[in-house]
Image (cartoon, rainbow, N blue to C red):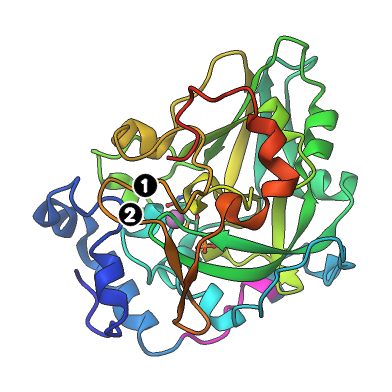
Amino acid sequence: MLIKFKKRWELSENAITPEAIYTDRRQILKAMGLAGVAGAALAGFGNPAFAAASEDPSASLYPVARNAAYEGGRPLTPEKLATTYNNFYEFGSHKSISEAAQALKIRPWSVKIDGLVEEEMDIDVDDLLSKMQLEERIYRHRCVEAWSMVVPWSGFALKDLVAFAKPKSNAKYLVMETFQDSSIAPGQKQFWYPWPYREGLTIEEATHDLSFIVTGLYGKPLPKQNGAPLRLAVPWKYGFKQIKSIVRFHFTDERPISFWEKLNDKEYGFWANVNPEVRHPRWSQATERDLRTGDRIPTQIYNGYEEEVASLYKDLGRERLFM
Ligand SMILES: Nc1nc2c(c(=O)[nH]1)N[C@H]1C(S)=C(S)[C@@H](COP(=O)(O)O)O[C@H]1N2
Ligand SMILES: [Mo]
């Protein structure tokens, strides 16, 4: 695509970005305009440390205590890689969006909690952070494009946010939405995408111990390119479930259709659990490329979290659980 400074090993992977076949590349080029080109070019020269962390009013909260119950199982991905190799289509449909994402304004940041809750509310992110118990967890992250990383997220248990929201007993799903502002996120001018980015979980999934709202990375506030100020981590699912820069938590009794599912429901579904035996229609999911080493390693069922999460799905045999 547009990236001049791409390494060889990135090529095959870029050819399988989710949108690659779906959209007309010329349309993408046109819509992305200069912002995308500049972002890609700059990132190729090695990014300066991002200033975001020192300006962030939540910076004094970090580092937070590590919860040793959550181990990566293999060495951490270097911070530099995890913060410069990203998927964030709001800022471009390629991996080098870290510079472009600095346009995101993360304060003030208001979060809406609405739908089937006792009382709908808008809450400021720093207010929310002050109510939640922050901890660090090392999680594996497996993108549907078959690359993976291991990173120390900071944040809080999603079940604590659910408890705080007080959903009504008929709430079955939690839907999350990303900000929408095409004046800072040029990708959102690409009208063929169903903006805003939307993802959802069942309430059982959302209140599972592993479900985590990420607010920090590597002992610092979360960089914008990784989804500041609030982002989801559900490590047994493909990366596209892990919605970034959340502005809304909506409780409903209706199963949502998420961003990628709306775009192409033959390739992406609601459940998106990792399974090495279920192919993506266009590639195998049997192995993944570890970002740190570049080596291909076997993919594990539920990304290695089977013991923790398999019981969530025991009565759902007819659902498409793995796409
Ligand atoms: N709003 C939004 N959230 C998103 C995405 C996106 O394009 N927009 N990409 C998803 C995908 S496909 C992946 S793999 C992860 C990437 O997270 P990272 O850049 O922190 O590695 O974010 C997910 N969350
Ligand atoms: Mo992904």
Residue most extreme to the left: 26
Q: Is residue 246 above or below residue 144?
A: above
Answer yes or no: do the residues labelled 1 and 2 have beta carbons within 8 Å? yes
Highlighted range, magenta: 47-53
Examine the structure image and report whether residue 230 is included in the region drawn in magenta: no
Residue most extreme to the top: 170
In the image, the residue with mark 2 has its CB under 8 Å from the nearest atom of ligand 1: no
Q: Quick one: label 1, few (<14), some, or many (20+) residues within 10 Å?
A: some
Q: Is residue 21 above or below residue 298?
A: above
Residue most extreme to the bottom: 45
Q: Position of residue 236 (x, y in %)?
A: 61, 49
Q: Quadrant of the N terminus?
A: bottom left
Q: Position of residue 140 (x, y in %)?
A: 63, 63
Q: Quick one: label 2, few (<14), some, or many (20+) residues within 10 Å?
A: many
Res. 195 in view: no
Q: Position of residue 40 (x, y in %)?
A: 31, 75
Q: Position of residue 127 (x, y in %)?
A: 82, 45
Please tell me the numbered disc located at residue 186.
2
Q: Is residue 79 above or below residue 145?
A: below
Q: Residue at x 25, y 71 (%)?
A: 12
Q: Amino acid at mark 1?
A: Ser
Q: Quadrant of the C terminus?
A: top left
Q: Which residue is mark 1?
A: 182
Q: Residue at x 56, y 49 (%)?
A: 242
Q: Which residue is at the front of the view, 263 or 108?
A: 263
